[in-house]
Amino acid sequence: MKTFLRILLILLGINFIVGFYLQSKGIAIAPKIIGLGVLVFALVLLPSFLYHRYRNKNIKDYTLDKEKINQIFDNLRDL
């Protein structure tokens, strides 16, 4: 998964470089190339990275529930 993410990030970087280069030359397809890169970034790379990063984590550690809110207020009262 780590290798997949690195390769995809490199390919997207190349995609953006080529897209902006073509845009500077005035070629009409350049915005489509850049847009495709943004779509792949948002719909493939970002969810894949988040899955890879948090797949073995306990989600309860990152959620705010009533018990944690009360603990925060208790700590604030002690100040």
Image (tube, grey):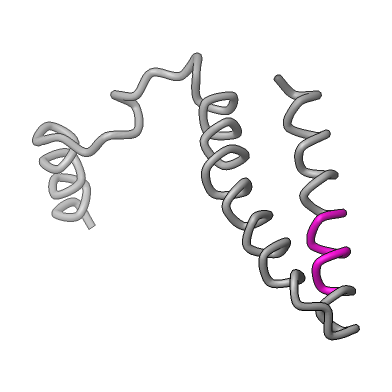
Q: Would you place residue 52 above or below residue 77 in this image?
A: above
Give the x, y percent position of residue 40: 62, 46
View extreme (top): residue: 56
Horizontally, residue 74 falls left or right of residue 34, namely left
Residue at 21% over, 47% down:
75
Give the x, y percent position of residue 20: 82, 73
Q: Place residue 28 in its image quadrant.
A: bottom right
Horizontally, residue 73 falls left or right of residue 5, namely left
Give the x, y percent position of residue 63: 27, 34
Residue at 14% over, 54% down:
77
Magenta portion: prevailing SS class: helix
Q: Place residue 8 in its image quadrant.
A: top right
Q: Would you place residue 27 above or below residue 78 in this image?
A: below
Is residue 37 in the magenta section? no
Q: Nearer the viewer, residue 20 or 1?
A: 20
Horizontally, residue 34 falls left or right of residue 20, namely left
Q: Place residue 13 in its image quadrant.
A: bottom right
Which image quarter is the N terminus in? top right
The residues colored magenta run 14-20
Q: Nearer the viewer, residue 53 or 20?
A: 20
Which image quarter is the C terminus in? bottom left
Q: Nearer the viewer, residue 79 or 26?
A: 26
Residue at 46% over, 19% down:
57
View extreme (front): residue: 28
Residue at 89% over, 74% down:
21
